[in-house]
Amino acid sequence: MTKESSDSAFSWVFNGLKATQEKQYETAIECFKKAIDIEPEGAYGYYYLGKTYALLNEYQAAINNFERAISYKPDYAAAWIEMGLAYHNIGKQPKAIECIAKGNEFASMREKKPAK
């Protein structure tokens, strides 16, 4: 990674995704945290950090990060759905259903928007 690209939140998210594909989860977590340090209000860093924690069965940490992603991008359908799955995995079914329904609602709203 070059010096210029290492300063970009996007490049850290990209590297985190690459590490996740290679099952290098601790490296991925470090990358997503660096993306968040650079862009603290960027929903994507929190979202992918949450997904990585979910892969490690650390569901409460996943939920915390999905909540942060949603706080910056309230209509983030994928974050709502992933948070619902994390709640499901810790046995909180009513909350899981609520989150997944909200995610599906945002996803269907996006699909109905006319193309520009």
Image (cartoon, rainbow, N blue to C red):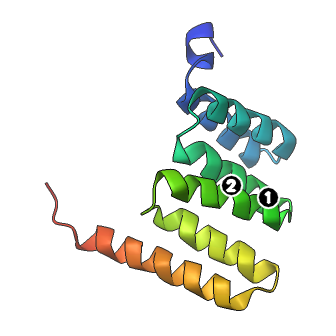
Distance, label 1 to label 2, CA atoms, is 6 Å
Q: What amino acid does circle 2 point to?
A: Asn
Q: Position of residue 93 (x, y in %)?
A: 71, 90
Q: Residue at x 79, y 79 (%)?
A: 89
Q: Residue at x 59, y 36 (%)?
A: 40
Query: Vertically, is 3 above or below 69?
Result: above
Apparent side of residue 26 relative to residue 98 in the rendered image (left or right): right
Q: Quadrant of residue 2?
A: top right
**Residue pointed to by mark 1:** 61
Look at the numbered disc 1 and give the secondary structure of its residue: helix
Query: Vertically, is 26 above or below 85?
Result: above
Apparent side of residue 34 relative to residue 39 in the rendered image (left or right): right
Which quadrant would the C terminus be assigned to in this image? bottom left
Mark 2 and mark 1 in contact (Cβ < 8 Å)? yes
Q: Position of residue 51 (x, y in %)?
A: 70, 57
Q: What amino acid does circle 1 point to?
A: Ala
Q: Position of residue 87 (x, y in %)?
A: 73, 77
Apparent side of residue 64 relative to residue 74 in the rendered image (left or right): right
